[in-house]
């Protein structure tokens, strides 16, 4: 969820690279060219020479590190910035989001994101991210309030609307308020359908809600819809597999489960869910060798 715009074509000032403005120009130009290594080197040197260069160089350096798949260094850059500029909303948000991605239960992430909402009260992304942290940490009422603030600040057609309504639905469901949850999920689905590229992750949350409500027929209709616009979306195949298994159609269920596993990528949660389903289904079909393979994966992970 980027919070800054980096890919700008700017002229490189050849005769004044010692000035802070020229240094940033050079870094922006390298970034625009995709040369993140050179941009990071320039920014590192600039910040070592002058820690009071403003918040932008820290954000730019963090983005370069992310593009180079150096997440720890990216976080280090924005944390340095936060230390120097503790009221900078963009730095607070960037640091909070980076921590949240790998440590959803981090109190530090929640603190940073809450501060970001106060530093940038009109920024929908800050409220959205804070709401997600609150949802992860079972603070559903805070999550709902934050996501509603994000909705109020964002415009129709903004993808954040789909996610915010979805998170509200998840929070309302956790609070045992199914009618409110369904209203939120349906609002999210309506907005999702209008996007050029609908979000399958948001839609699958509604599927799981309907399944928990024992409304499998409605859930499977939505699974069909998801697989039309996202045919390789593993979680939808897994939901289809579970439905088929419950109906006693084990062979088709096994086939869907294998697709779910193939599409799980490197996501640990998706991999574990797919292997667990396949182990159970293979055991039920008497395919002990296959079942053992999946069970062994689960035990080793």
Image (tube, rainbow, N blue to C red):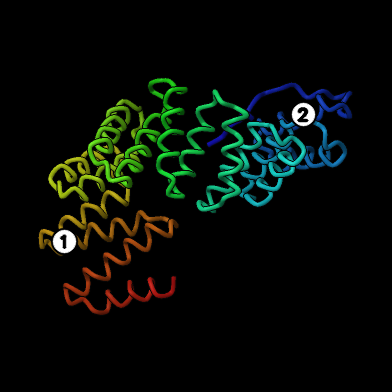
Height in image: 298 above or below 154? below
Height in image: 72 above or below 91? below
Q: Mark 2 points at which residue?
A: 24
Height in image: 36 above or below 214? above
Residue 275 location (% of width, % of height): 32, 66
Quadrant of image for the C terminus: bottom left
* Left or right of 140 in this view: 18: right
Q: Can residue 196 be seen in this view?
A: yes
C-alpha span from label 1 to label 2: 58 Å
Are the residues tagged 1 and 2 within 8 Å (C-beta)? Answer: no
Disc 2: CA contacts within 10 A as few (<14), some (14-19) or many (>=20): many
Q: Which residue is drawn at 54% across and 26% down?
A: 123
Q: Which residue is drawn at 76% across and 26% down?
A: 25
| 108 or 71: nearer the viewer | 108
- Residue at disc 2, secondary structure: helix
Q: Name the residue under label 1.
A: 245
- Residue at disc 1, secondary structure: helix
Residue 20 location (% of width, % of height): 83, 28
* Left or right of 188 in this view: 224: left
């Amino acid at each position: 969820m980027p919070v800054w715009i980096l890919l700008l074509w700017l002229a490189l000032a050849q005769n004044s690279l010692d000035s802070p403005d020229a240094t940033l120009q050079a870094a922006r130009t390298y970034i625009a060219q995709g040369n993140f290594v050179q941009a990071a080197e320039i920014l590192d040197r600039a910040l070592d020479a002058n820690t009071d260069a403003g918040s932008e160089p820290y954000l730019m350096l963090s983005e370069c590190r992310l593009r180079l798949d150096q997440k720890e260094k990216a976080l280090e850059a924005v944390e340095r910035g936060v230390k120097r500029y503790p009221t900078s909303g963009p730095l607070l948000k960037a640091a909070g989001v980076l921590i949240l991605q790998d440590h959803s239960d981090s109190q530090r992430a929640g603190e940073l994101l809450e501060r970001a909402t106060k530093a940038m009260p009109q920024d929908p992304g800050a409220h959205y991210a804070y709401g997600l942290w609150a949802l992860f940490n079972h603070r559903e009422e805070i999550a709902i309030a934050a996501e509603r603030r994000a909705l109020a600040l964002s415009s129709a057609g903004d993808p954040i609307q789909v996610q915010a309504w979805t998170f509200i639905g998840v929070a309302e469901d956790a609070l045992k308020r199914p009618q409110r949850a369904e209203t939120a999920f349906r609002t999210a689905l309506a907005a999702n359908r209008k996007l050029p590229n609908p979000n399958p992750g948001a839609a699958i949350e509604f599927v799981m809600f309907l399944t928990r409500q024992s409304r499998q027929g409605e859930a499977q209709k939505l699974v069909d819809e998801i697989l039309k616009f996202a045919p390789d979306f593993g979680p939808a195949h897994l939901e289809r597999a579970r439905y088929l298994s419950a109906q006693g159609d084990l062979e088709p269920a096994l086939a869907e489960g294998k697709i779910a596993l193939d599409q799980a990528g490197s996501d640990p949660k998706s991999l574990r869910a797919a292997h667990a389903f396949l182990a159970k289904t293979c055991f039920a079909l008497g395919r002990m060798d296959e079942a053992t393979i999946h069970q062994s994966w689960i035990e080793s992970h």
